[in-house]
Amino acid sequence: MPSLERDGATLWWDRRGDPSKPDLVLASGLGGTHGWWTPQFEEWGKHFHLLIFDQRGTGHSSRVPVASVWQMAEDLSAVLDAAGVERPLYLGHSTGGAIGVALALRRPGVFRRMVVYASTTHGDAYRRKLLGLRRMLMDRAGMDAYARYTTLLLHPPYFINANAERLDADEQAAAAALGEPEVQGSRLQAILDFDPRAELPGLDVPMLVVCTDDDILTPRYFSEELAALVPGARVHFEPRGGHALSRTEPARFGEIVLPFLKE
C-alpha cells in the first residue's frame, strides 16, 4: 500500500478505478478513513481514477494527534504530489470538505472543481456543544459509546430502523479505526477551530455545496453560508438522508454530484 512520511506521521493513500479517467479525490469526514466511500467505489471507478486516503490520526495512517485542519490540508497536498496527481476533481464530506477548502485557499488552482458535502464554515456554539458531548462520551464511556452516538448523528431514523444490524457492524469497525481519545479529541478540536470565512470570497474554484434538510451534525445553515461566501458556488439541498447522504441514499447522491463533476 502506498504511503509517505510527513510532519511526524505516516500517511496512507491508494488508487481505485480507471486510470484513463479523470482524477477524483475522495476525502472523508471526522472518521477520516477511506472506507466511508465504499458505496461509490465500484460504480464511480468506471468514471474516475479515484484517489483515496486515510487522514492523520485514523485508519492505516499514523494514530497521532492533529494540530489543525490546515495541517491536514498540507498532508493532502503531499499525498497529491506523491501520487503524481495534478488539478484533480475533489469531493469532501464534512471534515473532508474543510480540508479541501483549506488546501484550495493555500494552493490556488489545485482543484479543477470541488464538491463540499455536509460541511461547516466555523465552530459555532451549537457545534461546540454537540462535539463537546462527543468528546465527553469518548473520555468517560469509551470509543464504543462514541461510535454508537455517531450513528445517531450521521443517520436519520428511517435509515437506522431499516439497517440496524449493518450499523452495529459499522460501529465496531469505526471504533477500531479511530485513534486513542487524545487523538480523536484533537480531530474534534481541529474542526471546531477551523474558520476560513474571511478568506472564502477569494476562493476561485467551481464549487457545488450539498447538504440535507435533516442533517443535525452540520445543519444546512452552514452550507447556505458557504455557498453565499464562495463566488459562483452552487448549492443543493436534499430533503432527507441525514449527515451521511452518500451512504443512506447513494444512488440519489450520484444523481446530484456526478453531473457537476463531469462538466
Image (spheres, rainbow, N blue to C red):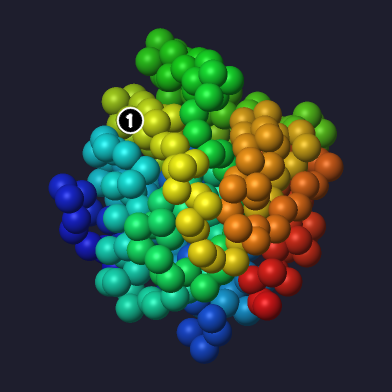
| Residue 252 appears in the picture as rendered | yes
Q: Which one is in front, 166 or 38?
A: 38
What SS does tag 1 mark?
A: helix
Q: How many marks?
A: 1
**Mark 1: amino acid:** Ser
Decide: few, some or many residues near mark 1? Use Cα within 10 Å; few <14, some 14-19, many ≥20: some
Q: Where residue 185 sits in the image (x, y, percent)?
A: 36, 26
Residue in the picture at 38% in, 15% down: 139
* Residue 69 lies in quadrant: top left
> Which residue lies most toward the top here?
140
Residue 220 appears left or right of 183 = right
Q: Give the percent coordinates (x, y) of residue 32.
A: 44, 45
Residue assigned mark 1: 186
Q: Residue at x 39, y 31 (%)?
A: 193
Horizontally, is 250 left or right of 68 in the view? right
Q: Nearer the viewer, residue 42 or 31?
A: 31
Q: Please tell me which residue lies in front, 244 or 120.
A: 120
Q: Residue at x 80, y 47 (%)?
A: 238
> Where 57 falls versus 81 (above or below)?
above
Residue 165 visible in the snapshot: no
Residue farthest to the bottom, as pictured: 20
Quick one: quadrant of the N terminus?
bottom left
Could you tell me which quadrant the C terminus lies in?
A: bottom right
Residue 15 point in image, percent of width and height? 43, 72
